[in-house]
Image (cartoon, rainbow, N blue to C red):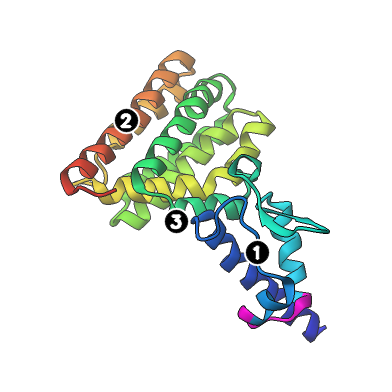
Amino acid sequence: MVKLAAVRSLHGQVVQELGRLIVGGGIAPGANLPREELLAERMHVSRTALREAMKVLSAKGLIESRQKTGTRVREVTYWNQLDADVLAWRCDLMPTDDFVEKLVEMREIIEPAAAASAARNRSDAELATLDAAYTAMADAVDRDAWAIADLAFHEAILQATHNELLASLFAVIETALGSYFQLSAQTASNFKYSLPHHKKVLDAIRRRHPEVARQAMLATVTDSRRNIRRHTKTTGAS
């Protein structure tokens, strides 16, 4: 049992190391990985641990193995972009401007519609959860506390839609949203600057005004992007 746990731990390390290397462009799509024995030696793991890691990376769509040509990195279009690990690696490694644009586009598509749905479908208990998250944002004493509360606020909205597909989507995009909210808070002179926008979303959901909630959420997302873009231009960050 101990030996099996050790293998799993090692293969997890290999998944993280190779996954980040592939997603970060260290091994380009179409390129072949070294032969199994060489790669295992280079990474200081057993071939058993390496094979387990390869199965995981294959399931994420990052690599494929063929009998005659070996193991190669797949084209980006085949990657499982909503896999929690792949999403986390992309959030960590992609340039800030790319990260912001892709995340904002995703938020613009999903969150205004979710806010409208929450205004139609929320229960009193779900409204109380949303209220509590907003209060935690208002009471936050630092950026980390703010980002945690901000994430809880947006999760509460998705849960209040009563749409299981939307609600489960949060588990997939949580890492990306968490990184985005941290970035947004870090780039603002006052990390609570967007609190009035969130209050408008909350009030619209409380009053069951779907279209008002939709527009308020869209304004929240747009303002957040504008803030980050402004900071990027000022600092010259990439």
**Which residue matches tag 1?**
33
Q: Is residue 136 visible?
A: no
Camera-side mark, 3 or 1:
1
x, y percentage for residue 120?
Answer: 56, 19
Is 193 left, or right, of 45 in this rendering?
left
Residue 5 higher or lower than 180, as above or below: below
Residue that badge 3 annotates: 92
- Quote the CA–CA distance across marks 2 and 1: 48 Å
At x 46%, y 51%, the residue is 91
| The magenta segment | 42-48
Look at the image and tell me whether residue 177 can be seen: yes
Q: Going by the image, does 29 lie left or right of 190?
A: right
**SS at circle 1:** loop
Marks 3/2: CA distance? 27 Å
In the drawing, what numbered circle is on residue 139? Answer: none
**Quarter of the figure that contains the N terminus:** bottom right
